[in-house]
Amino acid sequence: MRQGGLPINESPLDLNNWSKISPIKSTPDSLSVLVITSSPEQQTTLHSYLKGLGYEILGPFRSVSMGLEFISHRHPDLIIFDLVSNREERDSFTNLMENEAQSIPMIVLTNSEIKLSELEENSIELPVDPVQLSYKMEKLFDYQNQKISPVVQLIDFSTSFINKIHRMSPIDTKPRIKSIINRSFREDEIASFVSLSIPDGEFDLTVIEEDLPLETISSTLIFILRLIMDRMSSELEVGWTESLIAESIQSLAIEAHNFTKTVNQFVGKMGINTIELANSLTRLMQEVEEIEKSVFVGYMTLSDMGPVMLEVIGNDDQISTGIDDRIASQIITLVGQGSSYHEGIFGPIPIPTANNICGVIWSKVLQSKIKDIRMVGKSLSVIVIGFYSELLSIVPTQNELKEIFGFLESANHVNDITSSMLGQIQQDFLSKI
């Protein structure tokens, strides 16, 4: 692990800074809303509501023609039209609905005297109720199957972050880091907001009160993550915690092909210099593009004579040089010995060759003709995907690796694994890096 890493800005943690406002659900990230109203009051009101909900506001525009001029250059994700203050533009708006903006979801502001039958289900009577507005907008965006909500993005990032820290940490510190994470989520101020579970060995976060505003959930998650980072620095008494944190975030950014606007702002509030992060990602991706994406897939199993490398395929001859029975023995030893073996997906780990190669391992006990009484007609079978260590930063995620190896779960016998399967694994792995 490199020393130093990205600079982390220090600032005090204070639970008293949490803001509790009316429980309006948060909305999808970077969604743009074009507002058309000639009423100064509605311009102010809608701008305040939409900004508080996290939308990008386009306008407000005083007339349909002004809004149409903007739409000709950029389509918004949603249009809000104040039919009450712009009633004389009813026909212009109807024409907009049927032509230039027919694919854009719309909400119409009405009152008891003036309505628009074409959008009756998507109408809100003035004065605007922010809860009703939020509900209508979320319903439209869910129907349109648009972007993931900011709350989900922040929960997913926070979950991935603590799992990445734990996964990338040295083996001898994993139990202590796991303890720090567990203790941090049991703090009284935190336990009522977010719960932590560990299904299948992976940390999983759940926001208990989903209707809290985005800012409150964001502040809560930032407090938890920074508490974890501070405790790691003070309790582990090692010099690499900042580097681990920075490299974990960098790895997540690469896996996501850069962060969304919401997550990037969140990372900045965690104390990470996002400008330096972006610059380092640019440099790293340029380096990665120049690296030869060479991959081999090896299939090995236990026989009565010991571990045997049954087949190796690669997209160049050099990367698979030296991958033989000796290497098979060393790899199989990593997942168990004697009659006790671990099944699953492991790695990345260094492959002991002179080629600076790392690998991801899939292992499963399959039926075979082996005579060893300890195995009772079964044999540990292992598939390893090998690649140059320079590609470590863009190795597929654990979920992606599960997808790559997923079709192997139906294999029951050693002979069920074929050359075409190994080729498919190689192809799928290359498609994700």
Image (tube, rainbow, N blue to C red):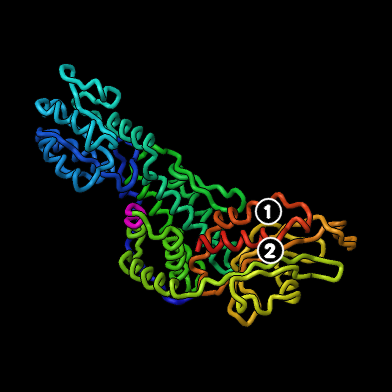
Secondary structure predominantly adopted by residues drawn in magenta: helix
Q: Is residue 23 visible?
A: no
Magenta extent: 261-266
Q: Going by the image, does 21 lie left or right of 126? A: right
Residue type of the residue flagged with mark 2? Ile
**For this rendering, which residue is in front, 73 or 131?**
73
Q: Earlier along the polypeptide chain: callout 1 or callout 2? A: 2
Query: Measured along the vertical axis of the image, is residue 236 above or below residue 182?
Result: below
The reply to whether the C-beta atoms of the residues labelled 1 and 2 are less than 8 Å apart is yes
Q: Of helix, strand and loop, which one carries label 2?
A: strand
**For this rendering, which residue is in front, 417 or 15?**
417
Residue type of the residue flagged with mark 1? Leu
Q: What is the crowding at mark 2: few (fewer than 14 residues within 10 Å), some, or many (at least 20)?
A: many
Give the residue at mark 1.
Answer: 408
Q: Report how far apart the C-alphas of labels 1 and 2 lie in the structure.
A: 10 Å
Q: Can residue 353 be seen in this view?
A: yes
Q: Of helix, strand and loop, which one carries label 1?
A: helix
Residue at left 32%, top 46%? 215
Give the residue at mark 2.
Answer: 383
